[in-house]
Amino acid sequence: MSSVIVMQLGYAFRSYPDTCRQRASAEAFGCARVAFNDAVRAREDARKAQQPFPKAAELSKRLITEAKRTASRSWLGEVSAVVLQQSPRDAETACRNFSASLRGTRKGLIGLRPGR
């Protein structure tokens, strides 16, 4: 009979970015937040219209790729596309987790479950 030893390691990092990196990070996080909010809004609009929820790939194309070509959202092109493309996927996961917590099928510390 063999035994298995499982060891988990954790690392903590601290960063001291210069002013230029601080600004770049703030721009990236701000653009990611805009893309996230747009994705959540698109899902909410679909729900109100009783339409199927748009997938993350469709939202990425509509809310990021096409939005960069408009004058009002051209500034989205100034940050990494990776940051922006992750936002609709994060919004989809957040909405899925929220729905699961309302149904009571999601485990974990969720204060939104009925009866708790």
Image (tube, helix red, strand yellow):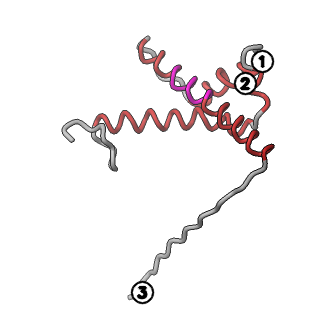
Q: Residue at x 67, y 31 (%)?
A: 31
Q: Is residue 96 above or below residue 71?
A: below
Q: Main secondary structure of the magenta part?
A: helix
Residue 17 at what x, y percent from top left?
75, 51
Q: Amino acid at mark 2?
A: Thr
Residue 37 forms part of the magenta stretch: yes
Q: Which residue is mark 3?
A: 2
Q: Which residues are magenta?
A: 34-41
Please tell me whether mark 1 or mark 3 is closer to you in this view.
Answer: 1
Q: Residue at x 45, y 15 (%)?
A: 51
Q: Is residue 98 above or below residue 16?
A: above
Tell me the crowding category of disc 1: few under 14, some 14 to 19, or many 20 or more residues within 10 angstroms, Cα based.
Answer: few
Where residue 26 sits, quadrant-wise, is top right
Q: Residue at x 58, y 32 (%)?
A: 88
10 left or right, relative to 69: left
**In this view of the protein, which residue sits in the foreground, 76 or 101?**
76
Q: Which residue is mark 2?
A: 65
Element at badge 1? loop
Q: Which residue is mark 1?
A: 69
Element at badge 3? loop
Residue 76 forms part of the magenta stretch: no
Is the C-beta separation of discs 1 and 2 under 8 Å? yes
- Mark 1 and mark 3 lie on one chain; the one further toward the N terminus is 3
